[in-house]
Amino acid sequence: MTRSREDFESRLRRIGAERYHDKHPFHHLLHGGGCTPDQVRAWVINRYYYQSRIPLKDAAFMSRVEDPALRRAWRSRIEDHDGTADNEGGIRRWLRLAEAVGLDPDYVASTRGVLPATRFAVDAYVRFVRDKTLLEAVAASLTELFAPKIHAERIEGLLKNYAFANDASLSYFRNRLKEAPKDVAFGLAWVLDHADTDEKQDAAAAALEFKTDVLWAQLDALHSAYVDPARIPPGAWQPGEGLALRAAS
């Protein structure tokens, strides 16, 4: 017998409780004030690649959606990141954070210094959303269920521990606290409505686990390259590169 809607939602939330990347050692280091300026910069550079690919992921999803109502509901996700006439968008806000930590935003936007593993993980997510069923694609987005907690912790930790942190530099996270709840409310309801067999529920749960793996893999790569053993792979950002003039002087 197919699990009830309530049991299935509990299963999805357990995935976040067990696997979300708020438990990764790098986040504990970052939020606790233990990162060096260069480790913060490496995080900003690599996380930008993920942020910049979210609109591509959502556009790939929408290109396969025949239901106008679903396209209308999903469209705001692209606008939240790319911006509109009235909203500068998450990508611009992330580049403001890059400036605040001493990076040249043009260098960050070029993605030249991104770790290979970051690129592989993020590109795999874009392909997943492009190629899998609509149910699996929406289910993968449900890591947003767990994001408000990490954003709140990040704001508190960065403000407490780093001189660059202020309302302007952290505006990305503050805006996501407002934007994410509407996205996740729609996405969760859609998944619960459409995962109406055991097979579909299993596929949706696996999709969410895949997405937690994508997020975790990015932090593993970051920690390995810039914390321990601090082995930076060829082609990735080296401390001192891509700095704004004021940071380099």
Image: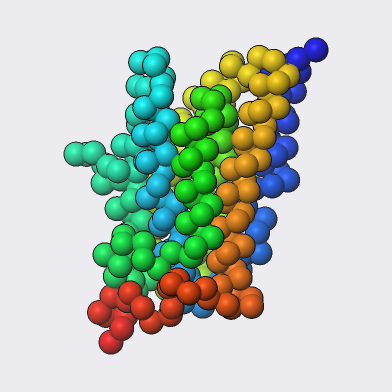
Colour pattern: rainbow
- Is residue 232 rendered to the left or right of residue 94? right
169 w.r.t. 69: above or below: below
Name the residue at the left extreme.
85
Q: Position of residue 55 (x, y in %)?
A: 37, 41
Q: In which quarter of the image is the C terminus?
A: bottom left
**Residue at (54% x, 25% y) in the render:** 133
**Residue at (39% x, 34% y) in the render:** 60
Name the residue at the right extreme.
1
**Residue at (64% x, 78% y) in the render:** 229
Q: Position of residue 50 (x, y in %)?
A: 45, 52
- Is residue 98 rendered to the left or right of residue 151? left
Q: In which quarter of the image is the N terminus?
A: top right
Q: Is residue 164 visible?
A: no
Q: Quadrant of residue 106?
A: bottom left
Q: Quadrant of residue 201?
A: top right
Total of numbered circles in the picture?
0
**Residue at (46% x, 34% y) in the render:** 130
- Is residue 80 rendered to the left or right of residue 10? left
Q: Position of residue 194 (x, y in %)?
A: 59, 16
Q: Can residue 65 be seen in this view?
A: yes
Q: For this rendering, which residue is in front, 1 or 103? A: 1
Q: Where is residue 125 in the image (x, y as percent from the top left)?
A: 51, 43
169 w.r.t. 236: above or below: above
